[in-house]
Amino acid sequence: MKWLITGAAGMVGSDLRDALTMRGEDVVALTKSDLDITDSRRVNAMIGEEKPSVVVNCAGYTRVDEAESNEGLANAINGSSVELLAQAAKGVGALLVHISSDFVFDGRKHSPYEINDITAALSAYGRSKLLGEIAATHAERHVILRTSWLFGHNGPNFVDAIRKQIHKGTNPLRVVNDQRGRPTYTPHLAEAIIRIANLDAHGMIHYADEPECTWYDFACAIVEELGAEVTVKPVSTEDFPRPATRPAYSVLSTERYERLTGVRPESWREGLREYLSN
Ligand SMILES: NC(=O)c1ccc[n+]([C@@H]2O[C@H](COP(=O)([O-])OP(=O)(O)OC[C@H]3O[C@@H](n4cnc5c(N)ncnc54)[C@H](OP(=O)(O)O)[C@@H]3O)[C@@H](O)[C@H]2O)c1
């Protein structure tokens, strides 16, 4: 099987590249400078020449707050470019695996979001991810893999933000306790992507680590794992106004992933331990 990864320098893309390389797989890992996915001519030429069996789109406009004032650019990268990838993948008969987000939901539910639940994004970023989901379906063979609250070695993330605050001497740490989700360690997501593509599964799939928690719970775990002498104070979203509205509840149900693979999602706490030990 030949893999082509876009956005290969990002948090997900680099861990997927490493996981595939470790397995001795045939991988073409393309960073933004190798392939800008908004460039239709280059997308067609690259996929047409490489003829991968799987295209994993890990490229994206991921600056959630900045997307509020850059919706056109977010839509171009997260939406229209996915259409280009879908058409190019279709042209060579490749499976397109496209990464989407819990931010496509409005967070009004109180039980985990199923794959067919109605989407209603609250932010420009979420709306751009919805455009990408629709575009991805235009590849004849596609997987839309929604995930949430990522942390990993090659991109800014919540764990790093908390660690920086601790190093700066911030005490107490004030962290929101009214947003619930499922943190996910990117090497765990990379394994899930490989498992799904090897099964030749199709359609919508959710993958997130277990269990669900709030950002406050997650911060407490980080402090505990670091053995830091810091107090974590729960606060509400209203105390931290930000340009983009986040869903209050964005727990993804991973039931279909578990059924297809026969494997339970990994534990983010174990991922956190591994992340902090490297
Ligand atoms: N982070 C999360 O919590 C989260 C949660 C759910 C879903 N997701 C989704 O997961 C996917 C991967 O996200 P990530 O966290 O790995 O993000 P990331 O670390 O920001 O990686 C995205 C990569 O895409 C590249 N990129 C941006 N514009 C591009 C373009 N026009 N052509 C080619 N590459 C381009 C970026 O390069 P530059 O940095 O040079 O711009 C970056 O290397 C995205 O689809 C994201 O929406 C993320």
Image: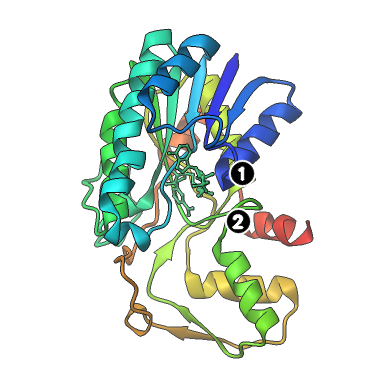
| Residue type (three-letter) at the residue carrying disc 1 | His
Q: Residue at x 58, y 54 (%)?
A: 155
Classify 121 as above or below 264: below
Q: Residue at x 73, y 25 (%)?
A: 23
> Alpha-carbon distance for marks 2 and 1?
9 Å
- Mark 2 and mark 1 residues within 8 Å of each other at the beta carbon: yes
Dot 2: few (<14), some (14–19), or many (≥20) neighbours within 10 Å?
many
Classify 229 as above or below 63: below
235 lies left or right of 184:
left
Outermost residue toward the right? 277
**Place of residue 187 in the rendered image (x, y in percent of width and height, measured from the top left):** 64, 44
Q: Residue at x 56, y 43 (%)?
A: 12
**Place of residue 170 in the rendered image (x, y in percent of width and height, measured from the top left):** 61, 87
Q: Which residue is mark 1?
A: 188
Classify 99 as above or below 45: below
Under tag 1, what secondary structure? helix
Which mark is drawn over residue 203?
Answer: none
76 lies left or right of 3:
left
Q: Which residue is mark 2?
A: 268
| Residue type (three-letter) at the residue carrying disc 2 | Trp
Can you see residue 110?
yes
**Place of residue 97 in the rendered image (x, y in percent of width and height, measured from the top left):** 45, 28
Classify 134 as above or below 172: above
Front one among 228 and 263:
228
